[in-house]
Amino acid sequence: MIKRRISRAIQIGRVKVGGGAPVSVQSMTKTDTKDVKATVAQIRELEECGCEIIRVAVPDNEAAEAIAKIKRKIEIPLVADIHFDYRLALAALKSGADGLRLNPGNIRDRDQIRKVVMAAKEKQIPIRIGVNFGSLPPAPGRKIPAADFMVKLAMEQVELLESMDFDLIKIALKAFDVPTTIEACRKIARKTPYPLHLGITESGLPQTGMIRSTAGIGILLYEGIGDTLRVSLSSHPRDEVFAGYEILKSLNMREHGPVLVSCPSCGRTEVDVLGLAQAVSDYLKGVHSPIKVAVMGCVVNGPGEARDADVGIACGKGKGVIFKKGDIICTVKEQEFLKSLIAEINSL
Ligand code: SF4
């Protein structure tokens, strides 16, 4: 069991973050926020994938105003992503954003921040202090490591918000470099009680980005650090949601749809295990219950290796056995592998 860091709970719309709540999965739209139709369509698609919090870019006033229209057509809470101009944060709050993300790397004027904090306080809207390695302010002659500098920057803003009697705070410290991100998050976790948002920035295309993100986010989660996460990928945001849940499922922290156990196949394999695993995986995309299905390449090891699967198949030459929780229930012919396994999945 992972022993989670005790963080203070905040509420992003209907979603509780921190305070022992399940680690929530977020994403960010890749549409022009001003294009309400396209943005709503993307958010709805993400809602169907299980996305729990959505963030939208607010680069100008029109985008801030679009939030009100978008909010009327979506279910999940919406966070406004603000850089450079504090007035956009005020406009987003007016439009009904459920959360703000401020970047202390590019909004540093205390009076401007004070105005945002006062408006957020009045509406009881949380603010994420989101420090990104890529947008650290210039620090000529900086002697401290990047992770420490990120922590310092976040702590300055935490203290500023606290001095205004504001504690609806969430913090994110993200870098492309995994050790830097881990180090920064470990340090901030020890210094504050606030919930942490995890992520690895600009982690890349799905194949490599998911691995990079899993290395960083997974290590932190296993240490009990993290209350919500976003996997940033150069891909459709549905891949970010998928990856977020797969990380949490791998650590037994969340259940979300089926889990497929499939063996890598080896010299003992006598059928197309990889093809069968892919076909089962495709079928499972339409299944939403958290069942565990196994596709194994041999009868010798199959049922034993996938003992805890709810249902599985262990393939042999020309025939295979279907098993449930490690117990063999019937033998089927090779032509019926997929059909029989699907019938058993449906019977659960
Ligand atoms: S389950 Fe059987 S076929 Fe698959 S990798 Fe293991 S030994 Fe090889």
Image: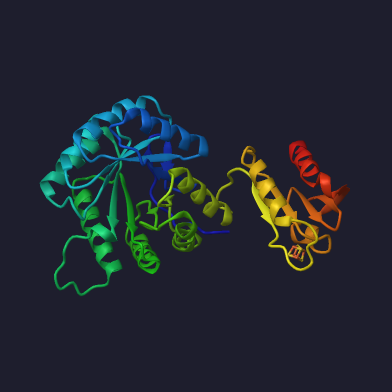
Q: Residue at x 24, y 66 (%)?
A: 149
In the depicted view, which residue is nearer to us: 112 or 322? Answer: 322
Residue 18: percent from left, percent from top: 42, 48
Is 146 on the left-hand or right-hand side of 115? right
Q: Residue at x 76, y 50 (%)?
A: 312
In the depicted view, which residue is nearer to us: 346 or 317? Answer: 317
Is 140 on the left-hand or right-hand side of 132? left
Residue 343: percent from left, percent from top: 78, 38
Q: Quadrant of the C terminus?
A: top right
Q: Is residue 21 visible?
A: no
Please, which colouring scheme is shown? Answer: rainbow
Ligand 1's quadrant is: bottom right
Does 227 appear above or below 70? below
Q: Residue at x 49, y 50 (%)?
A: 244
Total marks in image: 0
Residue 71: percent from left, percent from top: 35, 28
Is 337 on the left-hand or right-hand side of 18? right
Q: Residue at x 47, y 40 (%)?
A: 51
